[in-house]
Amino acid sequence: MATSIRLRRLGAIAAIAGGAYTIVRQPSFSSNDRGDKSTALDTFRRKIADPFAVVPPRDTQEAALIGSSLVNPLDILVVGGGATGCGVALDAATRGLRVGLVEREDFASGTSSRSTKLIHGGVRYLEKAVFNLDYGQLKLVFHALEERKQVIDNAPHLCRALPCMTPCFDWFDAIYYWAGLKMYDLVAGRHLLHLSRYYSAQESVELFPTLARNGKDKTLKGTVVYYDGQMNDSRLNVALACSAALAGAAVLNHAEVVSLLKDEGDGRIIGARIRNNLSAGLMSEEAVLVSKIGKEFDAYAKVVVNAAGPFCDSVRVLADKDAKPMICPSSGVHIVLPDYYSPDGMGLIVPKTKDGRVVFMLPWLGRTVAGTTDSNTSITMLPEPHENEIEFILDAISDYLNIKVRRTDVLSAWSGIRPLAIDPKANSTASISRDHVVTEDHPGLVTITGGKWTTYRSMAEDAVDVAIKSGKLNPANKCLTYNLQLVGADGWDPASFTVLAQQYVRMKRSHAGKVVPGAMDTAAAKHLSHAYGALAERVAAIAQNENLGKRLAHGYPFLEAEVAYCAREEYCESAVDFVARRCRLAFLDTDAAQRALPRIIEILAAEHKWDKSRQKQELHKGKEFLETFKSSKNAQFHDGKH
């Protein structure tokens, strides 16, 4: 029975694969909307790509928000600094609108820094589309594949195509996955990254040495390798925020919306009251404990766009205390393991484990990230992974590897909250979707939520379109973000790191205080090139000229110079901002991040003029934050099987 069902499914895949191109290939965009060489597009490209451009300082951005008024409001005020919120700010600013953005914590501090790091079209959704004969799902996959290519093209230094291997332990699986992934290639069309292909068992273990030849009481027959995209998610988010700032948006992190402003006549949302959470950090420690509040101000706007991710319902409640929830939160846990678990250039994806879930292992920034879980959760600012979820991931990957999988190898583990969307106008929860929802369920407040990282750009475009209609705004031009490269992308290519390696040295202070030169080795040069793109030379110059060339943590390429650069050029306002979102040390190795904290705080203190009290606060907050990343050293577990 099971075999006959699988044969029918295979037949359905083959049938749709044959007709996919005629079914799906619809021109998504007119030639006027995309890829035009308009004056506006060229202008914004120059602004963002200008090698001498610097983002406006934080005080200037705050002043721009404070300067709005009832008679001179912003066009759009964005609440939320994740991928979608920063995407909205960039889209709206490049349409010539006056834009402000506020984020309670830091850019990408929520879901956008805790993703799977994949930019994907959704091969699983393609399978559902085939089996359920769901044309809507098929269109979603096609759209995501198109957006996948644009994300990579617009930030090539932060994104790459990654081959992903699917092991096959019987011949039917090999044929089934090969056919399905060939359809995935076909649906991608001209947005294809690379063709998928089949590898024999011998070829597979040569490509992925830790892959087990025997598993699930079966012998490996071969593997099918297909390509998706991979990114450095929070750095991509920061690049979005900085690009929006260079395009003219006033972006402000660590600024919390405490209430929404309403028109006294018709009740329309006309702005927000905002608390600058950093102003509390400028007080003495005693004053902070007493006040618990920073400086507050009002920002006025014709439309407020709510892009607060898992927290969008808490913003909607500020407008209407009886608003129906539209978020169904789902927890996704990931763990980081040493590099030897997977080769640098190949990921492993198992579509169905013994309990039906998907599990993967992907090389990422010199380590291996594995996951993921998908379970109901409550919404919290700092979600923590549960030990049973970590154990599930370890159990799942151990079935496919020929090495011992140990709990003590877990360098970091984190949990992220996926904001699955429920359309508040729908009659049942059956409308829960991985797709996004844009709604204006209170006049003047447009909410965008759901979706995924891959489609952030088109999600932002949809939200801005609705905001323009809601506020009767007059943009100077149509959406320009389809072919707009982000900061650091212009002029970058994969060989750019060689310039850093050849032309810069890392001047560093020894323990005795003596300044000594060090080579800008390949690892450091490649890291800077990929993290900062065409702007990497700015960081290298700081390392060379300001004696900040020392590594922050043994075995990792992160340099002291990056802390200073991020404080000056990327709105890095706290130690956690740096260790979690500007560099990824917290996600890669929690214990190494903890050891690096004092030096990071020391450099930030020099940049931001922190007193001893503030430095003490930063150390406490940093350690508290890192406690939520369950490495083997800060977790309570009994190391039995692993």
Image (spheres, helix red, strand yellow):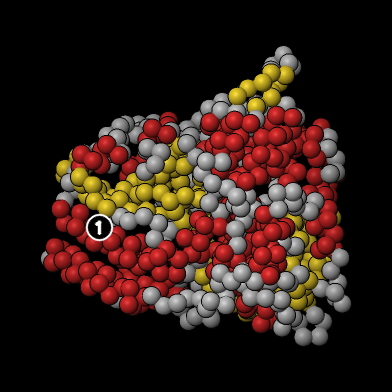
The quadrant of the image that shows the C terminus is top left
Say which residue appears at 83% left-offset and 53% top-offset. 59
Asked whether 623 or 6 is in front, the reply is 6
Query: Secondary structure beneath disc 1?
Result: helix
What amino acid type should be assigned to the residue bearing mark 1? Answer: Tyr
Residue 384: in sight, yes or no? no
Residue toward you, 339 or 290: 339
Q: Position of residue 221 (x, y in %)?
A: 17, 46
- Residue appearing at x 67%, y 51% in the figure: 106
Q: Where residue 367 appears, x then y in whole percent? A: 46, 37
Q: Position of residue 392 (x, y in %)?
A: 37, 45
On the picture, is 290 further left or further right than 183? right
The residue at 81%/85% (across/down) is 265
Relative to 614, is 94 on the left or the right? Answer: left
Q: Quadrant of the N terminus?
A: bottom left
Q: List the single residue furthest toward the bottom.
A: 266
Write the residue at 69% across / 23% down.
508
According to the picture, the residue beneath numbered tag 1 turns out to be 177
Q: Residues within 10 Å of mark 1 (few under 14, many from 20)?
A: many
**259 above or below 227?**
below
The image quarter containing residue 102 is bottom right
> Where's residue 504, x and y in %?
65, 30
In this rendering, the answer to whether 472 lies above or below 171 is: below
